[in-house]
Image (cartoon, coloured by chain):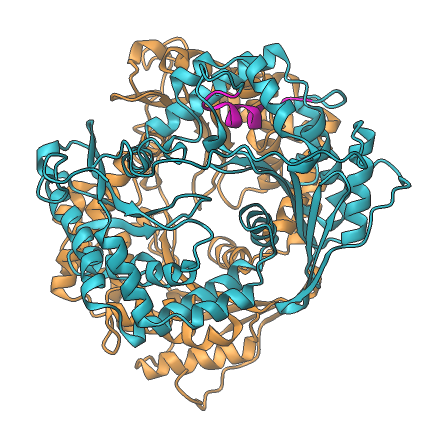
Chain colours: A orange, B cyan
């Protein structure tokens, strides 16, 4: 880090002793930067992430007067690795490679996160490199054109993955014209049209102190991190005392089901049909999130789940089959995936839908409920051995809920979920309009008996 | 586990205090079963694996008089999850799901491994379930047919992944008629033709005491594991005192370059060309493995590597680009992968080959050497935080080398690698016959300038 800085950093506004004797602390600097740490006793490594609550859903169309066009959030994420005023792209890569660390970033629908996992002694270096990238990216003109090529290849790679294509089409089918429906990376057209000015304006507007959340877990001392981070930001010219108001960039009024489609088929050669079937789900803050976790676990969460047993174990129709239920700030989806022989595609799609309806009509057993509780508790305990998971959990909770979420309390809520709760939620989900996305050597007509045609069932 | 058993289990023949104060112990039971553990202080979870040194390369053609046909090793791996005399497939799935554990298996070219990762209190359950699967699978007739369908879908899924197809074709191109060249899972033809009798004979012949290696890492007590494992095996009817000779099933005389191809192209629609280019590599026991690790790191191991910098950072031609260098008992490969626009495929393939030749001609800098040493040390330290990695490392070293491999000693060997060592090995590799596998909307003629045609360069 860049030496001591004489700042009044203030006391943490949260100090929490969590399970496993970890210590969670949160400090909000006057400028609005939020720093959360979870110190894990005995840990020899740490993961640190720099988060900003801006994702692909916060982008605007090219002709809207706003600077950020579709795919520009992800474009910016790439450019932050290309160099700063004092570090070249190679310098950034060398810094973390030389200590065997992991260094990457993720652009999601509602956030962007830059992170590094390193041994404890290398944490100050990671803070410096990430702070430099976050504050001082040069967004060089030549780098912009070169990285456009890299991103087009990333999109092409995803385009060659039929399961990925089915997932993207499914979000569009379920969420219609909602901004969450769009693919995170944009497409070849929007990336081809992206301009450096628009991406630079996006960087200037969104990567500010009140937008920055820094989380770290593992071998991390809270006060040292706050001091080191502050020093790095001050060295980059940031004024940590200047108060800037947070900006809510998120559109709040969206007609959820407008533009949805019951069926979308991408016909292409291939050995399998890749199917994603589902309905609108729950928002991230829905109080039934615990019920949804239990429902998803029983329905499609492991080898003992209903989807796995019915479609793979009993009938041998698929290798990969599971459900998923991401929640966002103002929408969510509940989906199921299976890859199967094209000749079985209609059967598998019908089986998936029938399983959800069976869950709604007949509910779950006490044994399934107990198993799901054990599954969620055990899987959390194993996942939290890794500082990546803790760092990510701190960041996502701060961005989505604005507060620390204690795992033990979350598991207690899971333990209070009843069979009636699960059945009621399954009933609600199964009554929502289904959408099916299918990719492979398949035809629309195959699925007419599974998903109602637009004529047969009114939208919304 | 199944209660106490009065066995003379003998003392461990290896007790080793490794870095991080972990305790490595090995016991060989009279029947030849090998048990290795690495107890990690402070760990609250454990990963346990049941290994057998039989993989796809040990299979025989259908008409050879031997029972195991191509793909049957992987077929058997699937069937072990389908039920035993006392547990149904659902029972097996429920046992591990109910505690939130991870439970899976991997079939490789030279081994098969069944593993579970659980919290410490659940380790006895995991030992019981894995021992039951390993000893007492029923290989039911109906399950056999149902699982044939699942495996065909797994193969179809891989067939829809062009990078996966390029990798399989590359192994065939480089290794020719060597058994390591074959795809692990067989193909639709061999799986369609597989018989339960052949798979059952493979199970009977290969899943015996002298073939079994059990490794565990994390929160594991060696003596308790040996006792619990022994009790579970005795309960399954195994005689742990009966001495059976180990069988070496591996063909040792193979003409390495017979049947190799300089170029193999799979033309199919798609957005990218998926390229794998390389040469025969080193065997697993080659004394230059440390040199190869350093070479691979510098050449294609991270964001600062030469391939990444030249092809992605400098030219923006690919998103994914890296090298890999697996070693097996009697062969190895050194390969490079890139996915790129079809119009750039010849350029990217030529750049990859040129980079290896540049490494051979000009060698590496001291700075690159130091960075690679730091990379390998740091990455190992981070990886070994996970009990999965430790369990896997114990098993692979026992199968490939017949001995425990101390990480600190391995890193000391890496630290002694010189620039001359790396250059000498690069020179040797670059002089070997290159093979290129390309999948996508590409033609053979595109690559004639990159890879010599069969007419221009004699095979072997």
B96 left or right of B112 in image = right
A69 left or right of B12 in image = left
Q: Residue at x 83, y 46 (%)?
A: B9
Q: Which is more toward the observer, A83 or B311? A: B311
Q: Residue at x 39, y 15 (%)?
A: B189
Percent coordinates x, y for residue A119 in the rendering? 51, 69
Q: Residue at x 57, y 33 (%)?
A: A301
Total labels: the figure holds 0
Q: Which is more toward the observer, A399 or B176? A: B176
Percent coordinates x, y for residue A204 in the rendering? 25, 66
In the picture, residue A95 is in which quadrant?
bottom left
| Residue at the extreme front | B253
B312 left or right of A362 in image = left
Please determine whether, in this image, residue A217 is positioned above or below residue A228: above
Percent coordinates x, y for residue B359 in the rendering? 22, 62
Percent coordinates x, y for residue B59 in the rendering? 48, 26
Does the segment drawn in magenta span residue B72? Answer: yes
Residue extent of the magenta highlight: B68-83
């Amino acid at each position: 880090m860049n030496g001591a800085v004489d700042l009044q950093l203030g006391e943490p506004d949260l100090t929490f002793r969590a399970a496993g004797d970890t210590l969670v602390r949160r400090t909000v600097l006057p400028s609005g930067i939020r720093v959360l740490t979870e110190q894990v006793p005995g840990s020899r490594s740490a993961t640190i992430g720099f988060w900003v609550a801006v994702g692909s859903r916060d982008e605007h169309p090219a002709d809207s007067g706003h600077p950020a066009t579709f795919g520009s959030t992800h474009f910016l994420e790439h450019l932050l690795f290309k160099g700063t005023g004092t570090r070249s792209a190679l310098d950034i890569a060398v810094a973390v490679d030389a200590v065997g660390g992991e260094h990457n970033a993720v652009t999601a629908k509602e956030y962007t996160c830059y992170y590094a996992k390193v041994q404890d002694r290398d944490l100050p270096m990671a803070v410096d490199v990430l702070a430099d990238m976050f504050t001082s990216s040069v967004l060089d003109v030549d780098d912009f054109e070169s990285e456009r090529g890299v991103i087009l290849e990333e999109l092409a790679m995803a385009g060659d993955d039929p399961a990925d294509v089915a997932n993207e089409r499914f979000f569009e089918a379920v969420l219609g014209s909602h901004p969450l429906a769009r693919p995170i990376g944009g497409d070849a057209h929007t990336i081809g049209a992206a301009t450096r000015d628009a991406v630079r304006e996006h960087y200037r507007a969104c990567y500010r102190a009140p937008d920055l959340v820094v989380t770290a877990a593992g071998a991390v001392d809270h006060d040292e991190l706050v001091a080191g981070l502050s020093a790095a930001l001050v060295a980059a010219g940031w004024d940590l005392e200047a108060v800037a108001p947070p900006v809510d960039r998120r559109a709040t009024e969206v007609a959820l089901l407008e533009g949805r489609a019951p069926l979308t088929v991408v016909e292409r050669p291939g050995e399998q049909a890749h199917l994603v079937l589902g309905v609108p789900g729950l928002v991230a803050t829905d109080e039934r999130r615990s019920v949804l976790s239990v429902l998803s676990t029983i329905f499609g969460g492991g080898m003992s789940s209903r989807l796995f047993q019915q479609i793979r174990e009993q009938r041998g129709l698929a290798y990969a089959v599971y459900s998923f239920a991401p929640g966002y700030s103002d929408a969510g989806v509940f989906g199921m995936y299976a890859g199967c022989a094209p000749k079985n595609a209609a059967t598998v799609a019908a089986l998936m839908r029938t399983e959800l309806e069976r869950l709604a009509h007949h509910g779950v057993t006490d044994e399934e409920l107990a198993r799901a509780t054990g599954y969620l508790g055990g899987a959390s305990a194993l996942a939290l051995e890794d500082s990546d998971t803790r760092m990510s959990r701190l960041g996502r909770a701060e961005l989505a809920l604005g507060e620390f979420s204690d795992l033990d309390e979350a598991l207690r809520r899971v333990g209070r979920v009843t069979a009636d709760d699960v059945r009621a939620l399954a009933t609600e989900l199964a009554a929502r309009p289904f959408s099916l996305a299918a990719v492979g050597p398949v035809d629309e007509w195959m699925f007419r008996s599974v998903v109602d045609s637009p004529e047969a069932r009114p939208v919304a």
